[in-house]
Image (cartoon, helix red, strand yellow):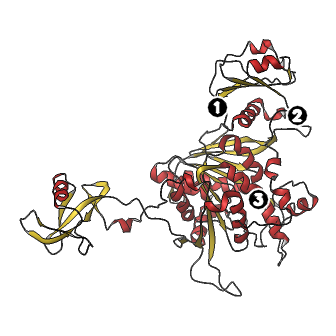
Amino acid sequence: MPTLHWIGKDKVINHHMDVPFKVLEHSYGFDNGTQTEQETNSGNKIIHGDNLEALKALLPEYEGKIKCIYIDPPYNTGNESWVYNDNVNDPKIKKWLGQVVGKEAEDLTRHDKWLCMMYPRLKLLHKLLADDGAIFISIDDNEQANLKLVCDEIFGGANLVSNMIWQKRKGGGNDSFYVAVDHEYLICYVKDKSFQKEKWRVAYEGDYLKRYRESDNDGRFYWDTLSRPGLNNPIIYDVVCPDGSIIKDGTWQISKATFDNELENGNVNFIKNKSGGYTVVRKVRMPEGKVFRSIINDTTNKDAADEMEIFLDNKKGFSTPKPTKLIDHVLQLITDENSIILDSFAGSGTTAHSVLQLNSKDNGNRKFILIQVDETDKKGQPIDIAETITAERVKRVIKGYGTTEGTSGSFDFYELGHSMFLDDGNLNELVGIKKIRQYIYYTETKTPLTSSKHKDNKHFLGKHNDTAYYFHYEQDEVTTLDHAFLATMKTKAEQYVIYADNCLLTKDFMTKHHIIFKKIPRDITRF
């Protein structure tokens, strides 16, 4: 498989592992129109901060659990201003990624910068994606070819679903020297095609379904014409209609015996036709939906601009929104009513808008996670997009705006907080013991630490795969793993992993009793 190489690639391939782990600090909750200091615990999150650090902060709770990822990253047109804090350990890369990409004719280094920015983020997104999940990425011609090669490398070329075309505008235009570009792309990869058990379908439009006649008011079935003239292997027999008339030499798709049995069971019926005679129909399960087409031409940027009227009362807006209908297509393809949807380049909050609308429509319980970093205006001044646009739009969708009824719903707003580790390698106690415990348990089990109560000492973390985990830690005290501590342990397991500052147990004793000692902070895994 061809691979893409660029200046700085060797510095970013594993950069996601070097990104400092930061905790999420709750800022406020928003519950059906009311802002509160308490967490709503709704599962809906808006995170303000650099998305590379935010994605890493999500791993303990969400690794392998995100069913659908949609991102709309910078297209790298040369006209944008994007800054992401990637502390790559190379002065040259630091310089590139610390600068704002401005108008640069054919300066290829801007493509190197973009790839260095995207690669570690895609690696973390791959980790977060569920085995049966999919990622959708909006892009245009500036980076489409590069993005596909990078995604082939990270997600696997065999897991490419499609490079869909989205018609972003209609009616042509005169803004290009050569041709008017009226399309963009929506690249889709799954985590693993072997987990895709069901055919991807989207619901038929209402007008299409009018052609079907519901069977006995049961929306699961419809009456379909049974007569099929011209079959290669016709089954010919006469049928007696309710009025006694006979359909002679009828060509049918089922045998006479099957017909009689189906008629008796109510699965075959007679419907009057326009000529006054009868059409013989059979009960058939309603179509599941159609396979989605790779050309999306039923929504445009004009729709997205119209949706931005949600901000007209205070003259806020967003320069490059996507229409909710585009996200609707994505959600229909891969999500179910309990899916988690992640957008790490949240922008105006279209993804949350679409999720809330769909939940309101089908009573679903989908959850959204949005991440948005500060952006800069034309003067280079930072703009707090996450609060003033992303979160504000979600609030208005929930409450309602203008003549549009609210969807109802809740979310929690977070900031990126302290790093888990200090520069000297010690634990940063400012993050709090609760978050430290969650971190330790995740590094050991790759599962989130639940808050359920256990009949054990306060240092017990949990039991996973018949291994019991303890984190013997006290602020401003030196802890020791000894026989006195063992006497306080109450959980029975095949193996014990115990963190402490020191250990007084002999190696032979620990081997005999299946105890693994891990020294704080030396043996705490960094990821």
Label 2 to label 1: alpha-carbon separation? 25 Å
Q: Which residue is mark 3?
A: 119
Q: Earlier in the sequence, mark 2 or mark 1?
A: 2
430 or 223: which is nearer to us?
223
Give the residue drawn at x 86%, y 24%: 501
> Can the viewer see residue 256?
yes
Q: Upstream in the sequence, badge 3 or badge 1?
A: 3
Disc 2 secondary structure class: loop
Picture quarter with the C terminus: top right
Question: Dot 1 lies on which element?
Answer: loop
At 9% from the left and 62% from the top, the residue drawn is 242
Q: Residue 207: which quarter of the image?
A: bottom left
> Which residue matches tag 2?
426
Report which quarter residue 73 is drawn in: bottom right
35 to 282, vertically: above or below = above
Q: Which residue carries the number 1 mark? A: 450
Q: Position of residue 8 (x, y in %)?
A: 86, 62
Please tell me which of labels 3 and 2 falls first in the chain: 3
Q: CA distance from mark 3 to mark 2?
A: 29 Å
Q: In this rendering, would 220 be left or right of 365?
A: left
Residue 373 in the image, given as x and y percentages of width and height: 75, 55
The answer to whether residue 72 is left or right of residue 205 is: right
